[in-house]
């Protein structure tokens, strides 16, 4: 991501008026603010250059989206900008304020992505049962272990409504349960590597 964010260093020399317009338009477009249009971004081509404007918009949009998804605060925004070469504290603070103002709208838009709200796991219940494969007393078969797993998922239909809790029930063999646990452990390990 730092390669994408390298443009922030180039914006250090931009005039404060142009930078403010760029930041306001970029964050506003990501938040789907009806008061902002793409035409305003194109108007900055003359002041900042088309390449810098487009790269700056892409970097600001990616940063705002990623940090809103993580529910970060203005301090994470300003430190990301500083780490990537934006040395002017007033410019960093401006983007931080814009981020805080538009973060709820960005998070709402992210929740509507693809028209599907992603459910959140709130609880897991499980039990281990044994199933007899044969009812023939002459030819007994060993007991087969079966895991019954119930996932409780919270799904909010819209931001204004309370989450609905749904349950999903699974019946898993020992091998399937081991695969599920390995997959969850791998996902946890990957998240830990990313610092999430």
Image: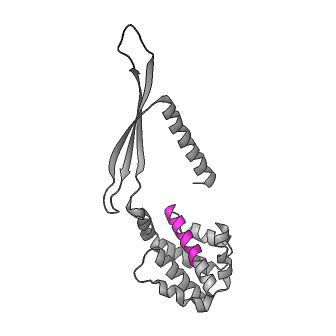
* Residue 187, magenta (yes or no): no
Horizontal and vertical percent position of residue 73: 53, 66
Residue 90 position (above or below residue 187): below
Horizontal and vertical percent position of residue 172: 44, 33
Residue 116 position (above or below residue 130): below
Q: Where, by quadrant of the figure, is residue 152 drawn?
A: top left
Split into 4 quadrants, where in the image is the C terminus? bottom right
Taking the image as shown, residue 173 lies to the left or right of residue 160, namely right
Taking the image as shown, residue 79 lies to the left or right of residue 167, namely right
* Figure colour scheme: one colour
Residue 89 position (above or below residue 124): below
Q: At 62% from the left edge and 69% from the top edge, which residue is drawn?
A: 80
The one nearer the camera, 49 or 126, is 49
Q: Which residues are magenta?
A: 57-73
Q: At 64% from the left edge and 66% from the top edge, which residue is drawn?
A: 1
Q: Where, by quadrant of the figure, is residue 145 drawn?
A: top left
Horizontal and vertical percent position of residue 97: 51, 75
Q: At 60% from the left edge and 71% from the top edge, which residue is drawn?
A: 78
Q: At 68% from the left edge and 77% from the top edge, which residue is drawn?
A: 9
């Amino acid at each position: 991501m730092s390669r994408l964010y390298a443009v922030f260093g180039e914006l250090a020399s931009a005039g404060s008026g142009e930078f403010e317009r760029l930041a306001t338009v970029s964050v506003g477009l990501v938040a789907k603010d009806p008061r902002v249009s793409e035409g305003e971004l194109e108007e900055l081509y003359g002041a900042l250059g088309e390449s810098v404007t487009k790269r700056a918009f892409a970097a600001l949009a990616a940063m705002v989206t990623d940090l809103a998804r993580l529910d970060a605060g203005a301090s994470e925004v300003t430190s990301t900008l500083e780490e990537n070469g934006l040395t002017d504290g007033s410019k960093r603070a401006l983007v931080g304020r814009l981020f805080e103002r538009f973060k709820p709208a960005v998070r709402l838009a992210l929740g509507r992505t693809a028209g599907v709200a992603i459910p959140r796991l709130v609880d897991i219940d499980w039990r281990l049962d044994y199933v007899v494969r044969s009812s023939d007393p002459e030819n007994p078969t060993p007991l087969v272990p079966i895991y019954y797993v119930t996932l409780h998922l919270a799904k909010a239909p819209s931001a204004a409504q309370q989450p609905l809790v749904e349950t999903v029930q699974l019946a898993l063999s020992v091998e399937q349960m081991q695969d599920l646990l390995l997959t969850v452990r791998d996902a946890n390990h990957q998240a830990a590597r990313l610092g999430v």
